[in-house]
């Protein structure tokens, strides 16, 4: 069975070992999926995040999941789209790579990603989807410990972009 699954839904409700947060450099919460994750996890998540001293774009840090069904949250910071010449593609790829590496290091077997950078950070959707799916497929090729990766999309347009990228890149 395919290890990557594209689904429509709310990432705060998914029962997996870890969900990934599309955070900002402060790691102190924000809008979009970040706000939803902090609301669902409760104030203890922010308390733990305060101790992390932020996160660089493209990197990832791990916390507990508190009131979430997920045991862990992996916080990564996607690039803000600036037109394509500010290393955005490589930074976005790093988010997926570093999140998966951190997951594997922590014994995580099931993980769910949101569509990093395609909301407030305005990264073009189809371009982001191809990068995300390519990096996940590459990682799974060399890593046996992760059993399932969900791409959790909040709307149909996003879901279709990732489903298309998966179909294109997995054949
Ligand atoms: P960024 O700042 O990285 O662009 P956003 O949170 O603005 O992050 O948007 C990233 C994606 O997350 C968008 O597709 C947005 O619709 C989606 N999103 C927002 N809330 C949720 C949620 N609860 N579960 C899954 N995806 C969500």
Image: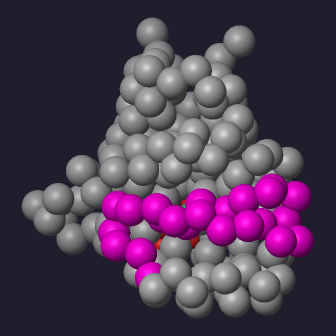
Tell me the magenta residue range: 54-76
User: Which quarter holds ligand 1?
Assistant: bottom right
Q: Position of residue 9 (x, y in %)?
A: 77, 52
Q: Is residue 73 magenta?
A: yes
Q: Position of residue 41 (x, y in %)?
A: 81, 75
Give the residue at x 63% y 30%.
Answer: 146
Q: Is residue 147 left or right of residue 60?
A: right
Give the residue at x 72% y 72%.
Answer: 37
Q: Position of residue 26 (x, y in %)?
A: 46, 86
Q: Is residue 21 left or right of residue 135?
A: right
As rendered, which of 89 and 143 lies closer to the eye?
143
Q: Quadrant of residue 109?
A: top right
Above or below, 135 relative to 56: above
Q: Is residue 162 left or right of residue 155?
A: left
Observer able to see residue 160: no
Observer able to see residue 72: yes
Q: Is residue 93 magenta?
A: no
Above or below, 55 relative to 151: below
Total marks in image: 0
Q: Quarter of the image for the N terminus: give it.
A: top right
Q: Quadrant of residue 92?
A: bottom left
As rendered, which of 65 and 170 lies closer to the eye?
65
Q: Quarter of the image for the C terminus: give it.
A: top left
Q: Is residue 56 left or right of residue 115?
A: left
Above or below, 108 relative to 25: above
Give the residue at x 24% y 50%.
Answer: 90
The colour mode here is: one colour
Give the residue at x 41% y 44%.
Answer: 97
Q: Position of residue 33 (x, y in %)?
A: 64, 70
């Amino acid at each position: 069975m395919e290890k990557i699954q594209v689904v429509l839904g709310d990432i705060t409700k998914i029962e997996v070992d870890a969900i990934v947060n599309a955070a900002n450099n402060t790691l102190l919460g924000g809008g979009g999926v970040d706000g939803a994750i902090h609301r669902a996890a409760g104030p203890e998540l922010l308390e733990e995040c305060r101790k992390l001293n932020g996160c660089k774009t493209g990197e990832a840090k791990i916390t507990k999941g508190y009131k979430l069904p997920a045991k862990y949250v992996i916080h990564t910071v996607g690039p803000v789209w600036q037109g394509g010449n500010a290393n955005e593609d490589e930074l976005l790829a790093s988010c997926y790579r570093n999140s998966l590496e951190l997951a594997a290091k922590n014994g995580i077997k099931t993980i769910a990603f949101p569509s990093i950078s395609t909301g407030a950070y305005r990264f073009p959707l189809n371009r982001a989807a191809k990068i995300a799916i390519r990096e996940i497929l590459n990682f799974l090729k060399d890593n046996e410990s992760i059993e399932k990766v969900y791409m959790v999309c909040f709307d149909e347009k996003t879901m279709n972009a990732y489903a298309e990228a998966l179909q294109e890149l997995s054949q």
